[in-house]
Amino acid sequence: MGLRQYLLKRLVHSVFVMLFVVTVVFFAVRSIPGDPARLMLGGDADPEALEALRAELGLNEPLYVQYFQWLRRLLTGDFGESIRTGEPVLGSLVQVAGPTLSIAMLGMVIALVIAIPTGIVSSVKRYEIEDYLSTTIAFFGISMPAFWIGIVLILVVGVNVDAIPTFGYTPINEGVGPWLRSILLPAIAVGFPYGGILMRMMRSSMLEVLNEDYMRTARAKGLTSNLVLFKHGLQNALIPVVTLAGIFLAVVLGGVVAVEIVFGIRGIGRLLIGSINRRDFPLIQGTVLIVSFVFVLANIVVDLLYTMINPRIKYGGGE
Amino acid sequence: MTVSSRFDTDGGRVFGLRTDLIEQFIGTVNRDLKAKLGVVIVTLFVIAAIFAPELAPYDPMAQDFAPLQAPALSSETPLGTDSFGRDLLSRLMYGARISLGVGLGAVLFGAISGVLLGLIAGFYGGWIDDLLMRGVDVMWAFPWLLIAIMLVAVFGQGVWNVIVAVGFAYIDDFARITRGEVLSIREEEYVLAAESVGLGDLEIVFEEVFPNTVAPIIVQFTVLVARAMLAEATLSFLGLGVKPSTPTWGALLGQGRDFITTAWWISILPGVLIMITVLGINLFGDALRDAFDVREVDSE
Amino acid sequence: MDDIQRSDLEGPKIDRRTTVKLLGAAGIGGTAGCLGGGDGSGGDGGDGESGDDGESGDDGESGGGASGSRISAGWLTDEIEFLDPHMVDLGIQIEIHSNLFNGLLKLNEDIEIVGDAAADWSLPDDTTYEFELHEGMTFHNGDTLDAEAVKWSLERLAGMDTSPHAGKVSNVDSIEADGLDLTINLTEPYAPFVSFMLRGPGRAGTIVHESAADDPDEYARMPIGSGPFELTERTAGESLTLDAYDDYWETDADGNSLPYLDGIDIELIPEPSTMWSALQGGEIDYANLLTGEFAQQAEGTGSLTVQTASAGEWSGIAPLCSNPDDNPEMVRWISGLGEEPTEMWNGEDIPTADPRVREALAIAIDREEIVERAAFGYGQPAHTLYNPAIGWLYNELGEGEPDPGFYYDPERAEELLDEAGYTGEPRLEATVLALTEDERELTVVQEQLSEIGVEIEIDIQQQSSYWDNTYRYEQLLCAYGGASDVDPWMSDFKQFGYPNEETTEGAWQRSLWFDEEYSDLLAEANTTPNLEDRAEVYQDINEMFVENVPFIPTMFPLNPKALVSELGGVGTQAGLSNFHRASLDE
């Protein structure tokens, strides 16, 4: 199967995967107990008022009618409006994407900054003190929940360093400095565990590359060790690391929710939790759709990269 | 994702695991300090968890002491008390049971479902493979947090929800690894040979294919137990975990957050325990990985 | 006599501290004077001292009179859905719109009812209310606020079918507006009516601008009010910007126009710990609510002031008193779920249907310990149903020590369970449905009940599931509470009255305790506008309540608010956060 064909096939698959996910979500969230009308009017609303609001929100229509209405609007790019605030869903998503992406990106940078040098050092100086030190740090990184790192950071840094806020997010258009300061601690909390994973990756793939035949040949040819290391070794060793980076999105979305809560930042994780708690159906659907889109896309990219570096597996993964 | 393994294919088996692997593992533990440390930590915590009722000094529920007592070795409550005046040491010991139990349970759930899916997909290939793996894609794209929230909405908080919600996210890991392994050995001589002598599908899968996929699965299992414990902590922290007043490390940590500046021990101590345990399990997993010579292609 | 004369001038006072004195001085005290029909004269209730000043006796406003400034305030919520006062039901929203709107009446710092938009008011007879409005009041868009505007607002509410408060004006017969004079005729005497006319907790009497009819959704988002602040900007889920309304009519005692502050930037902060770090880090100057653990910490700092006030809040546990399937029609109406009531209790033992069991649970609870352990002292033990924000009743029933009431007596509790035949080990097992915020309280209750051999399992649910499940009656116990209850109408008529679709009596029945005699007493109290007489009826109601235990009250929370010490003059009437007279020391 050629690359183009494979890509096409995967894309078609992906559309179905996403459709399936949102369909499941559509019916699942409506089947769990909880009534958005009751939440909006307060627990003590009288039955008549509830009924009237439900009718107004279109919640009394049969489920399949609601489903197709939603789907039809979706095809025109319309995600609908939040039940709770009446704001367009897409607008809310764009609004929360900023903080989450900022944290994810900076977290990623932090992770790479930790992982690549330590990974290289510990592979080159295998079984020396540098190696033990780096691996220990990596082990600690992957052994702590991200949100707990956040709590400790607040306790240690936030309370003592006035310049670094312990809560909230400052958009980048209010200044790069304040923006960076506002996402620094959450990004460390998210990035540190991920840096641990990456560092271990980096180390083992460097070790593998260092033992490859062409590396030995290069060294035998008399090229200086450092040059070899960077030109050939690093380049090849980075491939699986980059592959793994794609998966970072999944890591972020899993861990970032609690981190967002710890730092009081309204990001996509908190939006998701809040919308489910509030049974804000259009908002839940929109968020899940976007999140699953990112997951699926990352999956395709990862599979592609993986197939490229590991020719043993053919496109499409058949026999 | 595949984790490739290279080892000989002969030798005896214990529970489907070839004895030479066990020997290799013991060898690694003897050689490697890290591995020893891992084994010691894991054993210690498992003992603490199993014998919590015998070892804990007090009833973990009893609100018998003054709230927010700082840790002091000389006092009745050496690790201090929580905000209700419950003994923290006892709660941490009982917490080990749930935290470890949930970690194991969740991964077991994910492993059983995932391995079955992966075996079937890899062995049969074709449209079955396509269908199952696209199903796995869906699971992968499905935010596991959403599952946790929905389970709690329907069934309320509880240990089983956490196990299912956390374990669900690991099905795809196991399915992919197993399938990859199956694909890579599917065409090996001994499988083909088994087919040619007319063994049934089930027999081939469980007698010939599965045992040869075991090593990477065990490695993945250990890695994920560590991660599941972190996930349990996160869920409990978000209020999506076990029932209130059930002691788990994650829940204790979450409850302590509000007292971080006045009573740091309530959230720092369980956090440290989580860290040490997860560290131990990871070291243990690493030792297994080395012993089985499984290349690390780690994935979420 | 000073106090009493002033009360006379300001209309009926529901005075927390001097009720007895006032009631004793029948005919002079506001209660008797106005509601009883006495001379019916009012006076100038709108003098600057009457309402929204902060800590009583603190003359802090003088410093801030001239200089303006903005403050940043944290609000403990993730979203403010509605600010249309006729839709709002949650305290967290009421606290904001109390700064954006005027009501006909309001509560002052002593939980007395005084005039707000009404300068003067009287009752020529038991069913007629005459209000004389202040001059020169305008809405934020410049429109005049006169009797006609108030009439429009009340009639709008009466015609709304989605408002939870429409029922509060259902017995308004007619409204006449003439310039600044407003006359409201009721179909029958209705005592809670005054409470409904309050700004804030009364909900119904808050004056809505007619633009609400043009685009209700937009109005709920960015309402036009007449209060000291106008809402100029908001970002969903994040922040609200309140700017001082320059033409606000109210002035302080020295004639300076209110408010002093230039504006308030409200940040929505859903997490108590985030609120606390924001306050500590100086990112906010004010927190509308701190949980007990942080309030305690705040008191330990030198730079923060903690204010507490009853927001008309009460909490407790509703026991299931009857099988839902025994009264399917009533249960179907109450639940509003459109479902048949559960049949799970058919043929099953419902232990809490036995009043002895309910009493046992009620007296096995040590309320003082709950206040200490669960609320860090920020609460008052609830020995019966009526909360401190209903000052006249709370005081009349014996302030903090009502007689009769529920008092801790575990031995008697065990005897009662023995009598009822629950002698096993454990004696009883029950699940209690609850919300996250009940967790601390129930953790203490759980331990206390286990002392008498009753094991309860706490089932914490998300708010949305909680409300549905509450009305499915599948748990024996349900943690329940109310807030912003400034009239017993809300605490008992709606909760424990005999269900009646017409009057919405009993619409919030969680206990499924149906008693027509109790309902008759409630009706009698509701048609007794004279507070002294009404309080007397309530003696009987309270006796019936304690005897039958349709509800197990536990605590009246006192919601702590925290502010930086430079900020003064924030009013906490009935748990609100009124910035009318707030100012910053330079």
Image: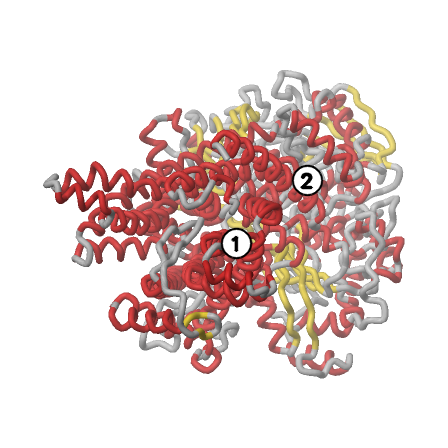
Residue B180 in the figure: left or right of residue C105? left
Q: Residues within 10 Å of mark 2 (few under 14, many from 20)?
A: many
Q: Residue C473 lies in what quarter of the image?
A: bottom right
In what quadrant of the picture does the N terminus of chain C appear? top right
Q: Nearer the viewer, mark 1 or mark 2?
A: 1
> Judging from the image, what secondary structure is the residue with disc 2 in?
helix
Q: Which residue is mark 1?
A: B175
Residue A54 in the figure: left or right of residue B220? right
> Which residue: 63% across, 16% down?
C142
Q: What is the C-alpha distance between the residues marked 1 and 2?
A: 42 Å
> Judging from the image, what secondary structure is the residue with disc 1 in?
helix
Q: Is residue C571 visible?
A: yes
Which chain hosts label 2?
A
Q: Are marks 1 and 2 on the same chain?
A: no
* Depicted B142 relative to depicted B48: above or below: above
Q: Which residue is mark 2?
A: A40
Residue C27: x and y in percent read 76, 45
Residue B195: x and y in percent read 55, 61
> Which residue: 54% across, 49% down?
B145
Q: Is residue C21 visible?
A: no
Which chain hosts label 1?
B
Return the residue nearer the eye: A37 or A272. Answer: A272
Residue A11: x and y in percent read 55, 33
Residue A38 in the figure: left or right of residue C255? right
Kindly identify the amino acid type of the residue bearing the numbered disc 1.
Ala
Kindly identify the amino acid type of the residue bearing the numbered disc 2.
Met
Residue C28: x and y in percent read 72, 44
